[in-house]
Amino acid sequence: AVLSQRSLPRSPLGRRISGAMSEARSDAENVVMGMACAPVFATALQPTIFLKHARMQALPLSTSPKVLWRGTTASIGNETGQAGLQFLTTGFFKRLASSHVGRPLKPLEDASAAAAAGA
């Protein structure tokens, strides 16, 4: 299906977005997007991170929410900076790659740009 210009989503700055998100957004928009996503996945993954660390340190495993989500604020702070930087560098590498080939990136090229950014 072909999208008309009116049906394309808009970025936070009001520009219409077409193509892959990270290459269609500005650097600032990519940083903000990464930083906005980080608290969601940091909170969702906190129990698994706690259980992994407890297991590695031979500590007793707990299912208490008070214990499982201990350190979530620090984890969110850590992930927010990292995700913002990863979204920024992914967008940069994707724009760099697409400017050299002159066409939208293929899935392997797209994944390679994300891997180069550390995703």
Image: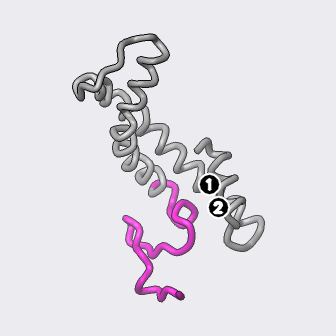
Q: The disc labelled 2 sits on which kind of residue?
A: Arg
Q: Name the residue rendered at 35%, 45% in the picture.
A: 40
Q: The disc labelled 1 sits on which kind of residue?
A: Phe
- Badge 2 vs badge 1, beta-carbon distance below 8 Å: yes
Residue 82: give x, y in percent of width and height. Answer: 49, 38
Residue, far right = 101
User: Magenta segment range?
Assistant: 1-28
Magenta segment includes 27 = yes
Using the rendered view, name the quadrant where residue 29 is placed. Answer: bottom left
Residue identifier under label 2: 95
Seen in the picture, residue 41 relative to 54 is either above or below; the reply is: below
Q: Name the residue rendered at 71%, 73% in the picture.
A: 103
Residue identifier under label 1: 92
Magenta segment includes 44 = no
Q: Secondary structure at mark 1?
A: helix
Q: Name the residue rendered at 37%, 49% in the picture.
A: 36
Q: Nearer the viewer, residue 57 or 112?
A: 57
Residue, far top = 58
